[in-house]
Image: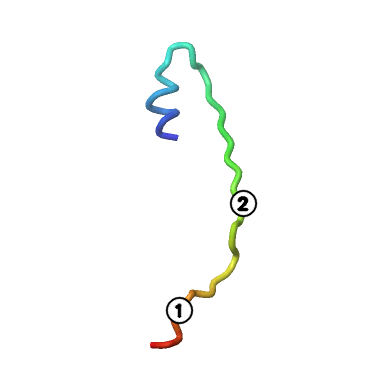
Amino acid sequence: ERFIREKLMRLRHIGEVHSHIAVTEIKNTTRLPLDTQL
């Protein structure tokens, strides 16, 4: 977003910018990898 605002939108030939982001879940867990030998 910062690149678009500070660089692209300041170019005189750029009038409008649209961007999309896709996010996928890599790992779904709440378990912490704790060492049980404390």
Say which residue appears at 59% left-offset and 62% top-offset.
27
> Image quadrant of residue 22?
top right
Q: What amino acid does circle 1 point to?
A: Leu
Identify the residue position indicated by label 2 in the image: 24
**Mark 1, other Cα within 10 Å: few <14 / some 14–19 / many ≥20:** few
Against 26, residue 32 (above or below) is: below
Residue 17 locus on image (x, y percent): 53, 25
Frontmost residue, 8 versus 34: 34
Disc 1 element: loop
Residue 26 locus on image (x, y percent): 59, 57
Residue 3 locus on image (x, y percent): 41, 30
Image disc number at residue 34: 1
Q: Residue furthest top?
A: 13
Residue 31 locus on image (x, y percent): 53, 75
Say which residue appears at 48% left-offset and 11% top-offset.
13
Quarter of the image with the C terminus in it: bottom left
